[in-house]
Amino acid sequence: MHFNLISIFPELFPGALATGLTGKALEKGVWSFDTINIRDFAEDKHKTVDDTPYGGGAGMVMRPDVLAKAIDHLGIRNQELGISNSGAGKIIYMSPRGTLLNQRKVEELAGVKTLSIICARYEGVDQRVLDKYGVEEVSVGDFILTNGEIAAYLLIDACVRKINGVLGNPQTHDEESFSIAGSSNLLEYPHYTRPEVWSGFSVPDVLKSGNHALIAKWRLEKAKELTAQKRPDLWAKFLKS
């Protein structure tokens, strides 16, 4: 899987993605990335990439002519790097008004070979760019960040861990939140490890029983309990499904 990161701060990548499992996968070539500096396509001496919004209002908006040149350059850049999936592939814009990034969305995007991510700042990007290139807006939550690079970290990490071979045990995918019992609406059950007794708290007896069927049943029930307590919205969806 290849990512194109379109940003005015390309030095932010790979950042935290160069550590841990994502870092090891990057070294092995399981996934790759390239950065496109939007300022490289500005034509004035100040390398201006934004301007005031039509109709007034606070903030600045990323210019469509500059951003479009960066997107159009992706095909040439990929050929220079020897990447067979030439072009921008699927283009994502990290935006608070986009489709919420959940596990189902991650699994969908993880199946894309080339994903280009627009990491905007300011007030956003000119709508005409989104319309022309069929850009899909994706949100990491109902809150506002100062930049799209941080949001892109989350998206890339979530996608990379879905690639075969990145996680040591493929069973991990089936036993974590949003994947338990074939449901995307349950949170993960509690985990315990040694010591058996710590600070007056003991590991539940069922987990020491060796009865895998009983353990599986306990974990499912705990997942349901936690979901009902912590995420009533997900619990309601689970009951409907």
Image (cartoon, rainbow, N blue to C red):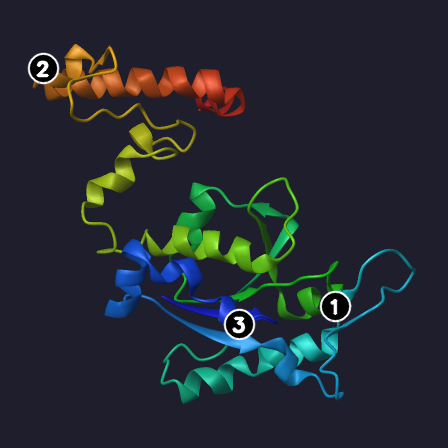
Identify the residue shown where x is 41% and y is 62%.
Answer: 112
Q: Amino acid at mark 1?
A: Arg
The answer to whether 163 appears left or right of 184 in the picture is left
Identify the residue shown where x is 40% and y is 19%.
Answer: 226
Q: In the rendered image, which residue does mark 1 sit on?
A: 128
Mark nearer the viewer, 3 or 2: 3
Whole-angstrom CA distance, mark 1 to mark 2, is: 61 Å
Q: Is residue 149 above or below residue 69?
A: above
Q: Give the mark nearest the N terminus, 3 or 2.
A: 3
- The answer to which quarter of the image holds residue 82 is bottom left
Whole-angstrom CA distance, mark 3 to mark 2, is: 52 Å
Q: Secondary structure at mark 2?
A: loop
Q: Amino acid at mark 3?
A: Pro
Q: Give the mark nearest the N terminus, 1 or 2.
A: 1
Q: Amino acid at mark 2?
A: Ser
Q: In the rendered image, which residue does mark 2 sit on?
A: 209
